[in-house]
Every structure is written in structure tokens, then in C-alpha cells.
């Protein structure tokens, strides 16, 4: 008997997020020249960046800061009623911060935090992106013209937080925000070291993996989707040409089977380029896939050992890193 999550579908998808960098100019160059994103306005010292098929005002708010890391992660509610329902649930759980004006292009946003201290914003109102003459797409069913330069990331795909208590953070996404838990890493002692959750039919939109250094509020990586696996091979060649640091890949993950490349942007934030092929989670009664320690020890799908820095590098960096 299917036990429906009463919060299911109240959150539509992962929206825009704030990223900090101590190397602002170089980071802007990375997002525009290497990834092929475009700027769409600025506010104060921040610049707004978007991928060519993101339908909203912007995707990344990049801000200079002495250390790298993630700021607020925004989620778009399905409608105004869904927004109010989730706000009430968050308040009741004691995780609410309060309402604020949205960033340019976005309506009233309710701020809250997860148990780990990562800040979130939940909103519904969103001004759809309007291309200028020089970036108008040939086909009106895509947001902006294909850039044809750099990696050409299509859209923001997911965010992977580091968390001290993966289960507590996972429970907020599932119980308060209606996410479905699709895959997990369950250690031999029964504790959960990684949790992949989705608001959509994609395999995952938000991930928590255990911060082995025990530091709260850190980022493991954000990921952008490319149209094809070939784009990711090309991204590796471009990284070589443009002196972008490749951490690992291209290869294929066992978990979620995503084809990947991990690079660091100049500020130190880890960025993944990913392609999940045609894989979707359609089953309404999807059974969470649990991966054991022994299965994880086999490495990635085709045998690549998980690189050690995957367990230690996060942003902000740990003291002394
Ligand atoms: Fe990822």
C-alpha cells in the first residue's frame, strides 16, 4: 500500500543559488568563458549568471567573499497555496527565519535553514527570462540562444551539500518539502552517509553527503546538466585548454548512473558537469536504493576509485586546507 507523502509536489524544482568566491573576476571568467553561461545583470558586488535553457531570471548569484562556499539555495514552490503550506510546516518545525524580498526577478521568499545550517529560500513568483535581440533563440520553446562556445551547460541540475547529520537534513527535504528519497549510502553501522532526493522526475535535485571533517554548512558541489555525454568529454578537453583544474572523470557514477566530470572553479568551489541520459524516476512507489559500504568500495560504475579529495574537499575549505 503506497504511503503518500502529503507534501509531495508542493516544491516544483531547485531554483537559483548563491555562490561565494575569493577570486571573483576569475570565477566570472570560468562561468562565462568555460561553462558558456551568460551574465544577466548585477546588484551591489554580485553578478547574476544563467544557463541557456534556464527559464527564470538567473541561476547563480556570484558574490565576492573571502572564502568560497554556498549561500542561499532557492526552491520554487508549485503555486501560492503550496508555498503557504510548506512555510507553515517549516515554521512548525522551528526551522523558519522569515520572509524577505526575492532577488531581482523573484517574488517574496521565505527563508529557513536545514539542521546543518545551510540557508534556503522558498518562493513562487518568478519573472520568466526575456531574451534580448542578440540572444533570442531560433526556436521559441527554449529560453535563450544556444551559446555555441564553452561547455554550453544547459541548466542547473542539482546541489550536493555536505552535512554532519545526513539523516536529519534528508528528513527536512522529505517530510517538510515533499522530496522523494531515491538512493542512499547506508554504512555497516546502519547510519546514512549519503542521501539523494528529488522534487521532480529526475533521479535527484538535492543531495547530502556526510562531512567527514564534521564541519556544518558546507558545499560539496553544484552540478550543471549538459545535453549529451559528448559535451562532457568536450568539457574535459576545454578544461585542459583553459587551465581549469580537473579533479576526477570523465567517468560514470554507480549511484544514479550519472556521467560526470568534476572541476574546481577558480574560487575553489567544486563544479560537476553531468549527464543522466534518458534516466528518469517515474514509479510513484519508487523503492529507495541503498548502497552498502562494500558496494561503494568498488568505486564508480566502471571501476574508477573514488578520488580521496572527494571525501575532504568542500567549501568553505576546512581550517588549514
Ligand atoms: Fe553530483
Image (cartoon, rainbow, N blue to C red):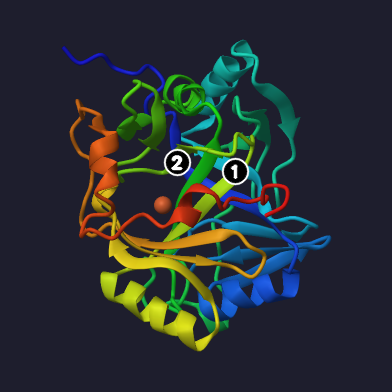
User: At which x and y percent is residue 70?
Assistant: 64, 49
Q: Residues within 10 Å of mark 1 (few under 14, many from 20)?
A: many
**Would you say residue 132 is visible in this rendering?**
no
Q: State which quarter of the image contains the C terminus.
A: bottom right
Q: Are marks 1 and 2 in contact (CB under 8 Å)?
A: yes
Q: CA distance from mark 1 to mark 2?
A: 10 Å
- Please name the residue shown 73% across and 48% down the image: 319
Q: Nearer the viewer, residue 11 or 304?
A: 304
Q: Which residue position holds label 2? A: 206
Please tell me the numbered disc located at residue 65.
Answer: none
Q: Quadrant of residue 242?
A: bottom right
Q: Nearer the viewer, residue 232 or 99?
A: 232
User: At which x and y percent is residue 237?
Assistant: 40, 83
Q: State which quarter of the image contains the N terminus.
A: top left
Q: Which residue position holds label 1? A: 73
254 left or right, relative to 107: left
- Please name the residue shown 18% across and 33% down the image: 283
User: At which x and y percent is residue 62?
Assistant: 69, 60
- Please name the residue shown 64% across and 20% down the image: 95
Q: Nearer the viewer, residue 307 or 93?
A: 307
User: At which x and y percent is residue 89?
Assistant: 55, 16
264 left or right, relative to 317: left
The mark nearer the N terminus, 1 or 2, is: 1
Amino acid at each position: 500500500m503506497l504511503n503518500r507523502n502529503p507534501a509531495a509536489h508542493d516544491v516544483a524544482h531547485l531554483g537559483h543559488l548563491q555562490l561565494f568566491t575569493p577570486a571573483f573576476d576569475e570565477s566570472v571568467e570560468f562561468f562565462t568563458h568555460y561553462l558558456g553561461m551568460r551574465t544577466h545583470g548585477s546588484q551591489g558586488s554580485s553578478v547574476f549568471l544563467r544557463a541557456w535553457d534556464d527559464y527564470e531570471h538567473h541561476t547563480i548569484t556570484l558574490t565576492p567573499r573571502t572564502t568560497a562556499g554556498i549561500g542561499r539555495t532557492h526552491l520554487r514552490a508549485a503555486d501560492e497555496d503550496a508555498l503557504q503550506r510548506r512555510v507553515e510546516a517549516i515554521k512548525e518545525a522551528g526551522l523558519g527565519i522569515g520572509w524577505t524580498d526575492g532577488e531581482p526577478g523573484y517574488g517574496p521568499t521565505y527563508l529557513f535553514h536545514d539542521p546543518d545550517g545551510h540557508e534556503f529560500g522558498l518562493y513562487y513568483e518568478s519573472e520568466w527570462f526575456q531574451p534580448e535581440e542578440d540572444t533570442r533563440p531560433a526556436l521559441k520553446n527554449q529560453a535563450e540562444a544556444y551559446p555555441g562556445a564553452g561547455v554550453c551547460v544547459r541548466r542547473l541540475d542539482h546541489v550536493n551539500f555536505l552535512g554532519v547529520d545526513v539523516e536529519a537534513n534528508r528528513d527536512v527535504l522529505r517530510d517538510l518539502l515533499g522530496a522523494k528519497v531515491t538512493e542512499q549510502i547506508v554504512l555497516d553501522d546502519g547510519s546514512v552517509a549519503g542521501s539523494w532526493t528529488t522534487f521532480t522526475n529526475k533521479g535527484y535535485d538535492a543531495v547530502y553527503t556526510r562531512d567527514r571533517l564534521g564541519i556544518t554548512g558546507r558545499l560539496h558541489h553544484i552540478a550543471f546538466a549538459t545535453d549529451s555525454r559528448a559535451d562532457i568529454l568536450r568539457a574535459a578537453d576545454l578544461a585542459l585548454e583553459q587551465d581549469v583544474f580537473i579533479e576526477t572523470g570523465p567517468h560514470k557514477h554507480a549511484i544514479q548512473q550519472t556521467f560526470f566530470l568534476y572541476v574546481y572553479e577558480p574560487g575553489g568551489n567544486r563544479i560537476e558537469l553531468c549527464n543522466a541520459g534518458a534516466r528518469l524516476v517515474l514509479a510513484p512507489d519508487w523503492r529507495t536504493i541503498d548502497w552498502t559500504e562494500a558496494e561503494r568500495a568498488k568505486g564508480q560504475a566502471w571501476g574508477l576509485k573514488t578520488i580521496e579529495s572527494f571525501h575532504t574537499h568542500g567549501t568553505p575549505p576546512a581550517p588549514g586546507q
